[in-house]
Image: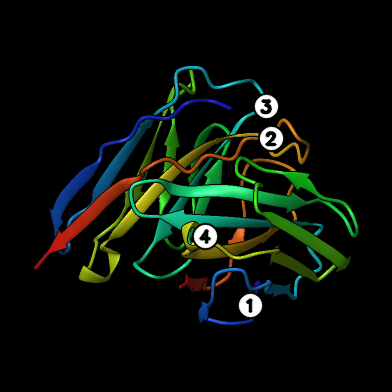
């Protein structure tokens, strides 16, 4: 399982685009990059997953450079309701005893009015 | 939409009681997971299951057991609850064998007194 590093916290203002970067220098060939959002007292919510280049859905975009050693979650035009903790996970779900799914501490994003 | 439900949002039990936490998913997912989340420690994987009657230990299985008799249902059992098992318990399910795309339930906040 690739170790990930992401900022502990970030502040931004409503209406701005927010980019959260995750470093994963030892990403393996079969690993995917997955992002979750979590609000207080709720379960994490799957946002987006990608393997290379760019993935976009109705919630966010995920940019992955060619070397795949980092990735950037991009949230367009954030609102106050985007205040949450964002987790970056990197790995391949093997579903055996060697699987180590580690959420880490995530990035605490605070959106200001 | 994937729906993962958990039997209780809040639960208070006494030390030594046997506790059952139930999780049901409605999307025919093969994989199901139990996590606990504690302040400062993040989400930690307790057990997971990739098929009916199959289970694998996660990072912190001690003091817990699981049961998966039907595909849609995954139960977490605390054989003899202790105060250090006071926590938020989160169930998740996934279909994909690539990456970590999981869908979480709302969580059960368990207090053991």
Q: Which labelled disc corresponds to residue B31?
A: none
Secondary structure under tag 4 reads helix
Percent x, y of residue B50: 82, 51
Same chain shared by disc 4 and disc 1? yes
Give the structural element (helix, strand or loop) at label 1. Answer: strand
Of badges 4 and 2, nearer the viewer stands: 4
- CA–CA distance in space, label 1 to label 3: 31 Å
Assign the C terminus of chain A to one quadrant of the image: bottom left
Identify the residue under disc 4: B85
Q: Earlier in the sequence, mark 4 or mark 1?
A: 1
Q: Mark 3 highlights which residue?
A: A30
Marks 4/2: CA–CA distance: 23 Å
Crowding near pointer 4: few (<14 within 10 Å), some, many (20+)? some
Q: Which residue is mark 2?
A: A99
Q: Which residue is mark 1?
A: B5
Which residue extends farthest front?
B16
> Tag 2, which secondary structure?
loop
- Which residue occupies 61% across, 69% down? B16
Percent of width and height locating residue B43: 48, 50
Say which residue appears at 66% left-offset and 43% top-offset: B58
């Amino acid at each position: 399982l690739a170790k990930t590093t992401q900022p502990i916290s970030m502040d931004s203002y409503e209406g701005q685009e927010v980019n959260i970067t995750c470093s994963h220098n030892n990403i393996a060939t079969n690993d995917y990059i997955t992002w979750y959002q979590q609000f207080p007292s709720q379960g994490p919510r799957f946002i987006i997953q990608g393997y290379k280049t760019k993935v976009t859905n109705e919630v966010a975009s995920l940019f992955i450079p060619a070397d795949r050693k980092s990735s950037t979650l991009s949230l367009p035009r954030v609102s106050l309701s985007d205040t949450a903790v964002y987790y970056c996970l990197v790995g391949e779900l093997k579903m055996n005893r060697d699987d180590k799914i580690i959420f880490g501490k995530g990035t605490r994003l605070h959106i200001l009015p | 939409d994937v729906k993962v439900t958990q039997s209780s949002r809040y639960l208070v039990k006494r030390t030594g009681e046997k506790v059952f936490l139930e999780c049901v998913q409605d999307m025919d997912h093969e994989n199901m997971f139990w996590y606990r989340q504690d302040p400062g420690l993040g989400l930690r994987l307790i057990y997971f299951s990739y098929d009916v009657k199959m289970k694998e230990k996660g990072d912190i299985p001690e003091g817990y057991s699981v049961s998966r008799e039907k595909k849609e249902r995954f139960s977490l059992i605390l054989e003899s609850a202790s105060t250090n098992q006071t926590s938020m318990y989160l169930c998740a399910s996934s279909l994909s064998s690539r990456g970590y795309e999981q869908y979480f339930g709302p969580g059960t906040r368990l207090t053991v007194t």
